[in-house]
Amino acid sequence: MRQYECECTMCGAKRSVAFREEPYPEYGEIVSAFCTNCNAETSHTRTLTRKTAAELRRKAEEENLRQTILDKCAAYSFSVRFLYQSVIITTPLADWCFDYHQNLITLYHESTYKVNLETGLYAKAHVQFSKREISPTEVVEYIARHDAWRAQHSRKTQR
């Protein structure tokens, strides 16, 4: 249950309205609620409060961050999928995954060699930048450099 301050579109009275089920109304969206001044079910609109402004700012920051990642990946022709708070980047050579909301990013990707050379055990994926402070754009640039090196290195070994 969430409570938002709403304004009656008929009389202009502001009051707190409780919403029990999702989807909750967005800022400016018109909803139906009982107005005590009008003594009737009228349309109300969600007003701008500090809480709503913070919510709008978070959404804008989230959208800007996602768009930055999408633009950076598009520059390298990588495909991108967002999954909850993680981004999955698919390159021609590998799949990469990291949580882009965290300040300390840990990058996961499939191993070049399917066997851990130190232990001899099967290794499907490994970790890079274990909890290191790095920006999502720096991670995408690292992925591009890594794949470029790997593509060049694999051509040399095939000769």
Image (spheres, rainbow, N blue to C red):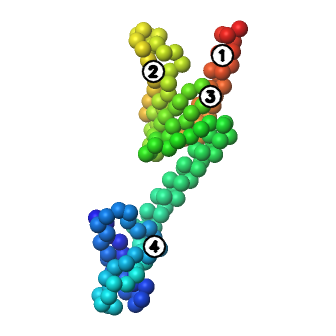
Q: What residue type is labelled 1?
A: His
Q: Do the residues labelled 2 and 3 touch (CB within 8 Å)?
A: no
Q: Do the residues labelled 4 and 3 touch (CB within 8 Å)?
A: no
What is the C-alpha distance between the residues marked 4 and 2? 47 Å
Q: Mark 4 points at which residue?
A: 29
What is the C-alpha distance between the residues marked 4 and 3? 43 Å
Q: Which of marks 2 and 3 is nearer the N terminus?
A: 3
Q: Which of marks 4 and 1 is nearer the N terminus?
A: 4
Count the marks.
4
Position above or below: 72 against 109: below
Image coordinates for residue 28, horizontal then vertical, percent: 47, 73
Label 4, secondary structure: give it.
loop
Q: Are marks 4 and 2 in contact (CB under 8 Å)?
A: no
Residue farthest to the right, as pictured:
159
Q: Mark 2 points at which residue?
A: 124
Image coordinates for residue 144, horizontal then vertical, percent: 63, 31
Please tell me the numbered disc located at residue 153: 1
What is the C-alpha distance between the residues marked 3 and 1? 15 Å
What is the C-alpha distance between the residues marked 2 and 3? 17 Å
Label 2, secondary structure: give it.
loop
What is the C-alpha distance between the residues marked 1 and 2? 20 Å
- Which tag is nearer the camera, tag 1 or tag 2? 2
Label 1, secondary structure: give it.
helix
